[in-house]
Image (spheres, rainbow, N blue to C red):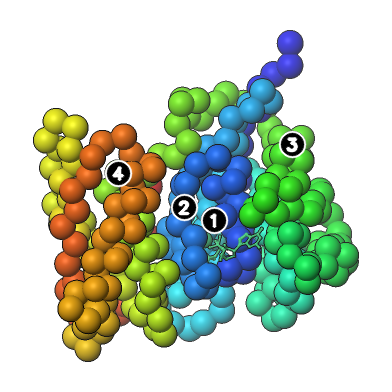
Amino acid sequence: MMLKKSAFVAIIGRPSVGKSTLLNRMCGEKVAIVSAVPQTTRNAIRGIVNRKDGQLVFIDTPGRHVSEKKFNKKLMEVSSRALEESDLVLYVLDACRAAGPEEEQTAALLSPLAEKTVAAVNKMDLPSADFNRAKEFVCARAPEIRKIISVSAGTGLGVEELIEALFQIAPEGEALYNEEYYTDQETGFRIAEIIREQAINRLRQELPHSLYVQIADMEFHESLLWVRAFIIVERESQKGMVVGKGGEMIKAIRLAALKELKRIFDWKIDLDLRVKTGKDWKHNDNTLRKIIEKKF
Ligand SMILES: Nc1nc2c(ncn2[C@@H]2O[C@H](COP(=O)(O)OP(=O)(O)OP(=O)(O)O)[C@@H](O)[C@H]2O)c(=O)[nH]1
Ligand SMILES: [Mg+2]
């Protein structure tokens, strides 16, 4: 009898390479939110994949980005901690972008871990994708890497091959989670994230980076979940943009979030959504601890 395998796998890469999209594709469910805006992911988000070989627990992380800003430093701590806690690494690159200084830094960070790393060159569905360019880069910077696979998180191309390659190097072990689960996130966190996703996708300029979502209250009444949530912005002047003319923007965010939540949860959800200012929340240690360092 073949022994089952199990491993924690940290998903690491630059912002916007498609780490969260890939996680969702591998899990077959929406585990992490996705947007075209870099630095969408702010937490270590676990997604569970079960196959006949065993179980892989992926940890999605904030994209590696170099900046001295306090907020960004916290995000990089999340990514580094996930790396420390993992057995294996999934290094994600964007096939459409040539490697710049940020990619060099990511590769340098992962190079010592190459023997437990598989690289995925993502977005191969796009016409400008260049697999060989990415492959040559990875081979030069991390020659010990176990495998480099061309994938599209968008279409699913190469994704099963990627999972197989990770199982090949995974240690033997018992499943870490019950096979019915595909994530271990709390309900409130997932709801907050879906609201944030729908807000990010509708707002412009610096607003996506300036907001977070707080669940103020949650109550179950039979099969109905009642939720009161706040979109919290950094400055008073930003509130109006989130509310929109005649409340149109907040209404659109609320409806889009409800539609998305309906796909995820079985219960009916009633959402009371408001906007509030959390002055300079990005510089407040307590707030940052609450929204970034919390483990899910
Ligand atoms: N065409 C195409 N687009 C993709 C693919 N994977 C991701 N995207 C798009 O790339 C953008 C970024 O995707 P995310 O999954 O949020 O990227 P991420 O690496 O998690 O980004 P951060 O969380 O900000 O680090 C989104 O607009 C996705 O729809 C892919 O395989 N093909
Ligand atoms: Mg992400």
Q: In the image, is the residue at mark 1 within 8 Å of ligand 2 by its beta carbon? A: yes
The quarter holding residue 112 reads bottom right
Question: Which residue position is annotated with label 4?
Answer: 187
| Disc 4 crowd, CA 10 A, few/some/many (<14, 14-19, 20+) | few
Three-letter amino acid code of the residue under disc 2: Ala
Q: Nearer the viewer, mark 2 or mark 3?
A: 2
Q: Residue at x 74, y 71 (%)?
A: 96
Position of 201 relative to 117 (above/below): below
Question: Which residue position is annotated with label 1?
Answer: 20
Q: CA distance from mark 4 to mark 3?
A: 30 Å
Q: CA distance from mark 2 to mark 4?
A: 13 Å
Mark 2 and mark 1 in contact? Answer it, CB < 8 Å. Answer: yes
| Disc 1 crowd, CA 10 A, few/some/many (<14, 14-19, 20+) | many
Q: Where does residue 36 sit, x and y in percent of width and height?
A: 53, 70
| Disc 2 crowd, CA 10 A, few/some/many (<14, 14-19, 20+) | many
Question: Which residue position is annotated with label 2?
Answer: 32
Q: Where does residue 120 sit, x and y in percent of width and height?
A: 73, 55
Q: In the image, is the residue at mark 4 within 8 Å of ligand 2 by its beta carbon? A: no
Q: Which mark is residue 99?
A: none
Q: Earlier in the sequence, mark 2 or mark 1?
A: 1
Element on which disc 2 rests:
loop
Q: Earlier in the sequence, mark 2 or mark 3?
A: 2
Q: In the image, is the residue at mark 3 within 8 Å of ligand 1 by its beta carbon? A: no
Q: Earlier in the sequence, mark 1 or mark 3?
A: 1
Q: Earlier in the sequence, mark 2 or mark 4?
A: 2
* Side (left or right) of 274 relative to 150: left
Q: Where does residue 125 sit, x and y in percent of width and height?
A: 74, 59
Question: Which residue position is annotated with label 3?
Answer: 164
Three-letter amino acid code of the residue under disc 1: Ser
Q: Residue at x 19, y 32 (%)?
A: 223
Q: In the image, is the residue at mark 2 within 8 Å of ligand 2 by its beta carbon? A: yes
Mark 2 and mark 3 in contact? Answer it, CB < 8 Å. Answer: no
